[in-house]
Structures are given as C-alpha cells and as structure tokens.
Image: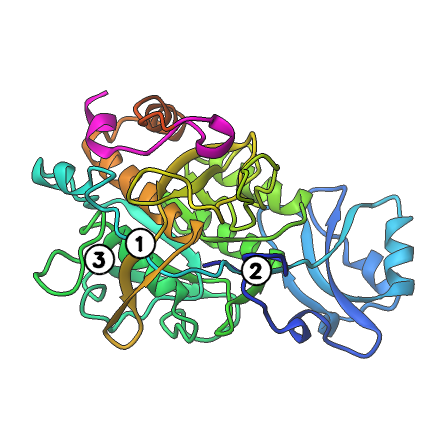
Amino acid sequence: MFVFSATPGFASGDSTDRNSGSGTKEYLVMFEEDSADMSVMKSIGISQSNILYEFELLPVLHVELSETQVNSLENHPQIKTVEENAEAKAYQQQTPWGITRVQGIAAQSQGYTGNNVKVAVLDSGIDRSHPDLSANVRGGYSVFGDSPYNDGNGHGTHVAGTVGAVNNNIGVIGVAPQADLYAVKVLNNSGSGSYAGIAQGIEWSINNGMDIINMSLGGSSSSSILEQYCNLAYNRGLLVVAAAGNSGTAAGNTNTVGYPARYNSVIAVAATNSNNVRGNFSSTGPTLELSAPGVSVLSTTPGGNYASYNGTSMASPHVAGVAAQVWQARPNLSNAQLRQILNASAQNLGSSYQYGNGLVRSLNAIQY
C-alpha cells in the first residue's frame, strides 16, 4: 500500500514528516532552466541545510521554505513551479487471492515466470528475510536513509509477494515467481510518504534499469512534477502500474481515481473479487485501465508471515506480475506495445468506468 493523501481508503500518516522547521514547510521547486540555479535560493535566504534533495533528471529541488520565501519564488522569473510536498500514504487493505484468476499459474506452466524482468516495488520496503521472497529481492533503496529491507508497515512485503513470491512449496506463490524484485522504500514504517519521495523512487528506478514500476499507493491531489516523473519513466521504456485508489462508492459512478494512477503514462488498476465483481471500495473513473483481484488476497507479510488484505493496492501487483510474465515471453515488445496487449487481451467485465478494459490475463496476452 502506498501512502496517499489522507482521504477515505488511505492509511493515515505522520504529518510531522513534511513540516520540519518552525514556520516552514516542505516544497518541490522546479526551475525553468535545465539545472537548478542555487543563487536564486541564496537570494531569498535559503541555505544548503534547507535543501533536502536535489533531483538529477529534472531541475527540481525538495526544499524547506517559509511562506515569505514561497511568495518570492512564485514570482521569480527563473522558477517554473512551486508545490507544497503533498502527503502520500499506503492504501488501507486486507488481502488477495487471484494468481490463478489472472492466468499466472497457466503462464508459469508454459515456462513464463518473469525471469530476468526487474520490478521496482515503490512502497514501504520489503522484508528480504522472508523465505518466500529472499531469493528474488535483488536490491533496493530508501528515500528515508534507512534500510529498504526494513518494512515496519508490512504493506510493501505483501505487495511484493503478489508480484513474485517464490515457487518453493511453502507459503504462497506470486504471479511471476522468478522476477527480480527491488525494494524502493518511499513509504515510512507508518505507511506514509510524500510526492517528493515517490518522484525520488521513480528517479532511482530509471537510473537503475528497472523494467516495471509498481506503485500501490497514491494521493488525492495532482502534482505536475510527479506527473512529469511518471512520464519520464514511461518515455524511458518502463511500464508504470499503480493502484487506482480505495475511494470508490457503492454506485461506482464518481471519478475517484487517485494520483499517480490517474496520469496518462500510468496503468490505473481497479480491484475485483472472486466473482469478477468490483470491490465497492475500488475507485472508479474514465482513466481506469485494467482490473485485477483485490479482495481477500493472501500474500507475504514481515517476519515470515502471511495475511489476506483487500484493496487496489493488492490488485496493482497482479498486473505488474502479469506484465513481467508477458515481457519474459515477448522480450522484443516495447512498453507501449506491452501495455496495448495487456488491454486488448483483458476479459471484459462491464462498464469501463468501473473496470477499465477488464480483467488482466497473462496467457491470453502472451498468445495475443
């Protein structure tokens, strides 16, 4: 589960993470030029200690600012965007079941296990010591400076198990049990994070050669910078998958898809139950692209344990795992071609506003 802004269906987080100093808040600042001009920051009294992170691929700074400094930057000709660092949190969830439903086992029987496909799990970390995950977790990174293998929340470990729990005759099996998993910790041990952290995780994924990014997390507000990072990943050839959100209504007629799932470069995933019916918590809207199991899904949790969760956070890794299987089977596909095939081969479940193009199916996509 990813930390989304505090909205229905999201886990609450510690807001003190984003309000550091007296009278200051954290912001994302984007420059008009190709690189950040530090003289602009110095001119309004910003010191190096106020700069929390300097991004590499776009001229963006994560920085602490006072209200006066924000006003100065917003009116500065060299500054393109000033955005308050929005909070992100893990989607509240329970558990999944659908490896067979998405044809994961059928594809595995044909030899498609996601072998050598790199999947970045942008989440709360992954417990690398879990016996169902240890063989597949190849590396990681934490935006918090701690170990990416310290998953105090448990959400990321659960998501990782759905993508690629090992076929070892114990516990559970993932959709792509030989995929290479990378723990990119962008949510803290309370399940909270921020858009700056997500962007940093995406940047790490691009720089470290990931094939697929899974983001079982999100927020209710948009960010042009986060959108540009999602676009950048997609334009660099990565497939970007995200949970649609857990803010759906029983009627399912309101546009409640969160961010980053709502961006055009991201596959937004809805959650279904064992009857192929939308979970009434699953967000709906015109940007939904695929559906996957997200009700009562069993997967790995820290300490060698297992649990069942509900949520679009559980649905998204089914799609990431299927994508890994298909990419192993058809390695010459571009990410855009893979995306088109996943959508074209999906099982129609009804209204696209509630289900997108339907239930993702691995073997159908491989044979499409």
Q: What residue is disc 2 on?
A: 197
Q: Quadrant of the N terminus?
A: bottom left
Ranked by sequence position, the earlier of labels 3 and 1 is 1
Snapshot quadrant of residue 357:
top left
Ranked by sequence position, the earlier of labels 2 and 1 is 1
What mark, if any, has residue 165 been given in the picture? 3
Real-space Cα distance between discs 2 and 3? 26 Å
Real-space Cα distance between discs 3 and 1? 13 Å
Real-space Cα distance between discs 2 and 1? 26 Å
Q: Which residues are magenta?
A: 350-368
Q: Do the residues bearing badges 3 and 1 touch, measured as CB atoms within 8 Å?
A: no
Under mark 1, the amino acid is: Pro
Give the total of numbered labels: 3
- Going 84% across and 64% down the picture, which residue do you hit? 42
Under mark 3, the amino acid is: Ala
Q: Position of residue 130 (x, y in %)?
A: 23, 71
